[in-house]
Image: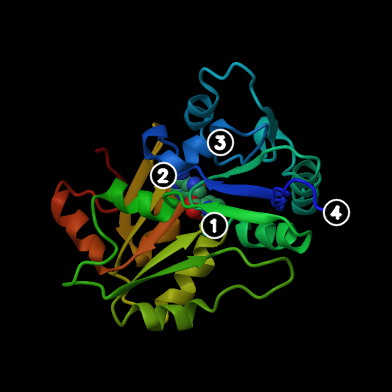
Amino acid sequence: MSGPPRRPVRPPSCALVGAGPGDPELLTLKALRLARRATVLLVDDLVSDAVLAAVLRGRTKPPRVVHVGKRGGCRSTPQAFIERLMVKETLAGERVVRLKGGDPFIFGRGGEEAQALRAQGIEVEVVNGITSGLAAATALGVPWTHRQHAQGVMLVTGHAQDGAAGPDWAVLGAAAAQGLTLVIYMGMARLAAVQQGLSTAMRATTPAAVVQHAGLPQERRLLTTLGRLAVDARAAGLGSPAIVVIGDVLQGVAAAHQTGAVGTLFAA
Ligand code: SAH
């Protein structure tokens, strides 16, 4: 008994899409295409309103938008809930897109989400976005690698998993002192400890910078030194979300802003 050829059954799939740092013009074409055809859109609190507006613009049948962040002063949505929702909606036949700030696989738990989906037999499509650490480099006008100053970059989180020990800043500082630019995500809450640890291996005069809201209209930048990092960031009232950068590549910024910008916020 032979019927008509069966169409191969495609496994269910879900997309983890990088929304970049906030400017809709920095979205990839692929990110925009996938997000615009979603029927369910799970949106991070780090995704800018402008990006969301670009994704929803002109849609005759808008997707169901679920904000899974801290917007509106609510507590952050538990990670397990987000993962369950992605699995449930994908298996129910929805086109689910998880729109994440920056790049989905640079911190931000994209790896855990991909694992949870794959464990349920769901295919995961990952679309790169411009990570906020790179947006911070552009905001400061310096590359993380400049062959006169740095042979590489370390992307490090300042936030440890609950109960786990954080990074050993003295060890990282010793490595960075060999010519690596340190780019720290989620570091603002522990800035004093970060500074203290790094200072055991790096000069207090090593240039340091903080970029809050990189790539967004409300972006703020501070240029200082490792020795003054915590005190200057506090005085400037800088907080999350921000990228902290430490390394000699920043000498270029100091040179470009010879107006005594060290220790002060500076404008474009
Ligand atoms: N996947 C994201 C990072 C998520 S972790 C990315 O690739 O950018 C969250 C941390 O990212 C924040 O604590 C902060 O350190 C950083 N971050 C995210 N958006 C930012 C922004 N617009 N400006 C500065 N830092 C940002």
Q: Please tell me whether mark 2 sits on a helix, a strand or a loop.
A: loop
Q: What's the colour scheme?
A: rainbow
Marks 4 and 3 sit apart, C-alpha to C-alpha, by 43 Å
Residue 237, numbered label: none
N-terminal of the pair, mark 1 or mark 2, is 1
Marks 4 and 1 sit apart, C-alpha to C-alpha, by 62 Å
Q: Please tell me whether mark 3 sits on a helix, a strand or a loop.
A: helix
Give the residue type at disc 4: Met
Quick one: label 4, few (<14), some, or many (20+) residues within 10 Å? few
Q: Position of residue 192 (x, y in %)?
A: 51, 64
Q: Position of residue 70 (x, y in %)?
A: 67, 39
Task: Judge left or right: residue 147 versus residue 106.
Answer: left
Give the residue type at disc 2: Ala
Task: Judge left or right: residue 258 versus residue 161.
Answer: left
Q: Please tell me whether mark 4 sits on a helix, a strand or a loop.
A: loop
What residue did someone put label 1 on?
A: 186
